[in-house]
Image: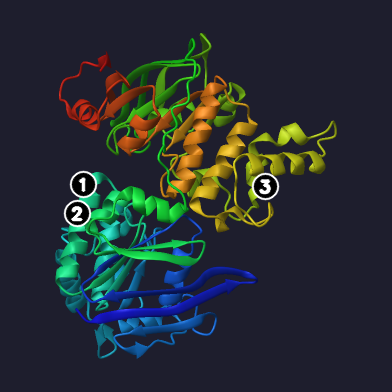
Amino acid sequence: MPCLLEMKNITKQFGVVKAVDNVSLKVDAGQVLSLCGENGSGKSTLMKVLCGIYPHGTWQGDIYFSGDLITAKSIRETEQKGIAIIHQELALVKQMSVLENMFLGNEWGRYGLMDYEAMYLRCRKMLAQVKLNVDPNTRVGELGLGQQQLVEIAKALNKQVRLLVLDEPTASLTESETETLLEIISDLRDHGIACIYISHKLNEVKAISDLICVIRDGRHIATRSAVGITEEEIIAMMVGRELTELYPQAPHQIGEIILQVDNLTAWHPVNRHIRRVNDVSFTLRRGEILGVAGLVGSGRTETMQCIFGAYAGRWQGSISVNNQPVLIEHCRHAMALGIAMVPEDRKRDGIVSVMGVGANITLAALKKYSGPLSMLDEAQEQATIRDSLARLKVKTSSSLLAIGRLSGGNQQKAILARCLLLNPQILILDEPTRGIDIGAKAEIYKLINQLVQQGIAVIVVSSELPEVLGLSDRVLVMHEGRIKADLLNRDLTQEKIMEAALRSDTDVEKHAV
């Protein structure tokens, strides 16, 4: 295949900081190159240079596409050349139809009028190409995340894309949706369309890639064939060290029951006849890591939201903390009982993106720094912020920097720092490592083990079964709102968990191995 893209000696600086430092890469037509690196390594910056988000003249180096030098000043110019990028945060207008999104800013018309018939037929053709069977007039907001991802790809194909950049495309997708997406990328490759694929999920990277390019600290480390390279080798290049023990197995003492949940049932906030959680009962012990597994939509998150007082719909059931029945109607009630939670969607529920990193950390504990006249003791607050940033190794140029500008891993660590300021006795972590790099994952896993050694009880909800198995003392398996199994993590396998999740009987398997 001929060389389609060549980026030569690309350097992009922000002040004195080199986000990308003399990086070069090549992609042939019909080739999939995966771009790997920790958050903050320069991957996204490099792609923004390629796609014209950072216009020519604001960076150094050369970019050739089909042999032509690119000097694009905007993303529109690179799209016209056949380069399209799909960000992790999808750029679709949820209130508009699939058809309207696909032709937004690129409408077809004749005689000064919109040619809806031609656009409709073209939209159906593009949707069929990505194997999405929905009517073009369907409102995008009514589609699932996986379907919206396919709409974005169809939109790119509609612009005659020749190089497709996908930034963390499967971070919020189910396993089946991920399989569909990877099949489509493989099909695009067979039709000569090149792809640059950015993902922290190394099993996907290995499955779909022809080449794997690793960037660390803004510099190109290596580009290797995907054939024969191991995940351990990729990780070592990404972080500059081997992570032979990703899941630390530090000894910790499991004590008495600290949380008991009985007959918890929660109804859908809108369709109130639908039960999202159905008669769930379980216990949690002091110093225990309780994993919660199950397919997306199994009721895991809704169960945790009820316990933390954050569920938007109606629910009922009994909750006891330290053998005392409690009423939790709001998050502040949960926090007063020593319950803290890192939410599944950190951007929507976990951070105030325009506020500083430090302000986000102390947000839930401001009363600690208030004097008798409700005046804030800023010196004490700043001292706490400095200690929290150091303890959780949050990388930021300043505590005043807007938290939305940090990498996903550093945002997650800042949210954890906020939770720890509450001195919790129960810590709920819902998808604690979604969309963050392998190095940040290792740091969070280490922190979890340190917390349970101190006697804190931790619940880890995760879609990644290796994570559940690597961390947990015991695993709850949920399916369609019910707990299907309560399993001790002794010789437990992914197959055993999936078998429990998909079984049709209603009996709960207790502490099986």
Q: Amino acid at mark 1?
A: Ser
Q: x%, y% of residue 313? A: 41, 33
Q: Nearer the viewer, residue 228 or 410?
A: 228
Q: Nearer the viewer, residue 264 or 489?
A: 489
Q: Amino acid at mark 3?
A: Gly
- Say above or below: 356 vs 28: above
Q: Residue at x 60, y 52 (%)?
A: 395
Q: Amino acid at mark 2?
A: Thr
Q: Residue at x 52, y 18 (%)?
A: 327
Q: Is residue 421 left or right of residue 247?
A: right
Q: Are marks 1 and 2 in contact (CB under 8 Å)?
A: yes
Secondary structure at badge 1 equals helix
For the residues marked 3 and 1, what is the alpha-carbon distance in whole angstroms?
A: 39 Å
Please tell me the numbered disc located at residue 180.
2
Say whether disc 2 or disc 3 marks the residue closer to the N-terminus: 2
Q: Is residue 194 left or right of residue 462?
A: left
- Mark 3 Cα within 10 Å, few/some/many (few <14, many 20+)? many
Return the residue at label 3: 358
Q: Residue at x 33, y 30 (%)?
A: 469
Q: x%, y% of residue 172? A: 34, 49
Q: Nearer the viewer, residue 9 or 441?
A: 9
Residue 398: image quadrant is bottom right
- Mark 1 Cα within 10 Å, few/some/many (few <14, many 20+)? few
